[in-house]
Image: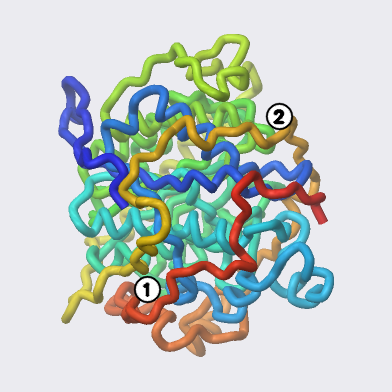
Amino acid sequence: MDLTGDGGGNSLSAGPDATKRKVCYFYDPEVGNYYYGQGHPMKPHRIRMTHALLAHYGLLHSMQVFKPNPARDRDLCRFHADDYVSFLRSITPETQQDQMRALKRFNVGEDCPVFDGLYNFCQTYAGGSMGGAVKLNHGHDIAINWAGGLHHAKKCEASGFCYVNDIVLAILELLKQHERVLYVDIDIHHGDGVEEAFYTTDRVMTVSFHKFGDYFPGTGDIRDVGHGNGKYYSLNVPLDDGIDDESYHSLFKPIMGKVMEVFRPGAVVLQCGADSLSGDRLGCFNLSIRGHAECVKYMRSFNVPLLLLGGGGYTIRNVARCWCYETGVALGVEVEDKMPPHEYYEYFGPDYTLHVAPSNMENKNTRQVLEDIRAKLLDNLSQLRHAPSVQFQERPPDTEFAEPDEDLEDPDERHDSDSDMEEDYPKSCRPTANSIQNVRIKRENLEKEEIHKATPEHVKGTEPMNEDSCFTFKPSDVGPMSVDEPSNVKVEQDSQNKLPDGPVAMHQKP
């Protein structure tokens, strides 16, 4: 749903990035109403704050703005197990006490609580990422969905505040058009769910820069390089506390430059988790907003279709700052540091600026360790003699979404950035010890070759995907999947899961 009618993007005035980009941006005004619960560090409200900054900086006028169509059950089941999706659709705060066994089975409870509108939330953020992938397949240069990037979700379980893995779903959509897709993750946490999904294929390369060592989710060792056809197509960059811009880029640029040279992806998905910024409530890195955004600028410079997604980020004023600035980078616009007055202006005092100075915390990443990591990963990349290729007999159809009901509000009406910006969250954010503990590491399953020979699924779970939603890990057919015709899709949402008009009621964390 085009909400602006303007498909253009500004360009930088000079230099290698001075190419006009066609940029689109996905945003649902209801996303800020979802609430994980009192004391939970994940706050979807940060997406609304980001949107307010984009509106008041005037960036919405430079790109197409779309309201995402909700992902349907069949869309989610391309990766996730049918019974898991059914569980997410049916569970509510009122009924969860009657489903304790299912809650445990699907890892829903502490880190991933049940809250009002949970399934609608999943449909919204997944729909934005899948919609962005469709737009890239149809000629857009850059697509943005700051509500997406929930990289921990597994085939059969929630993990790390993530319920549905919108990234995997978006990559599967991109594989319909592109022989190879690159996934890059600059969240402070390892992108385990995405790596796991594509661990045995050479059509998707995953590269994750993350804190490693006694830190959630506990995966992402430099020695984890993929399996079978996917060997050396998973790269992990394990980092220690306090890494700064200079140290980070000393790894990011040479590694990603070599990846682009060797792998030659047709599209790139960049997860821009903002918990790697200095001062994050759950993080321990020391990146500035400019340093974080330099990664976006670098990946943009390759002129390959680029999907930008959100992710972690728990000091919400800095999350909004970061993703606003990175939207400017995507557009090729240098955003002014002095912040314009807007409805969340008081969050950004006392300086009321876009950028914040890094702290003086110790950088525990020594030059020698960084050089060793760089050398090891570049050596891994040297094992890839050439980019893999795959023959497509017929490109599968793009995902189609149900048409909106004509009786509903006009979908082409431009978002009024001031219309739904009520403050509905406390400013405090209390991280909990449980936020880095409640996931089981599954690497031992990946190390047993007989499991891979027995089944294409290496993600934990006993239920097979249905025929038209599963994918195998052969280089020739990872991407193509049949897509059901949308003619029989019911447009109306289930009234049981429909959100109220006002902010969602707050529930205590289970």
Q: Quadrant of residue 313?
A: top right
Q: Which residue matches tag 1?
A: 229
Give the distance between the C-alpha atoms of the residues marked 2 and 1, in whole angstroms: 48 Å
Asked if residue 257 can be seen in this view, the reply is: no
The amino acid at mark 2 is Lys
Q: Which residue is pictured at 43% across the width and 30% down the height?
A: 324
Q: Position of residue 77 (x, y in %)?
A: 48, 75
Pick whichever, 176 or 145, lies toward us: 145
The amino acid at mark 1 is Asn
Mark 2 or mark 1, earlier in chain: 1
Q: Position of residue 420 (x, y in %)?
A: 53, 37
Q: Is residue 341 above or below residue 87?
A: above
Is residue 446 left or right of 105 when viewed as pictured? left
Pick whichever, 284 or 452, lies toward us: 284
Q: Position of residue 209 (x, y in %)?
A: 50, 44
Q: Which residue is pictured at 63% across the width and 69% down the height?
A: 88
Q: Which residue matches tag 2?
A: 427
Q: Is residue 343 above or below residue 271?
A: above
* SS at mark 2 in the image: loop
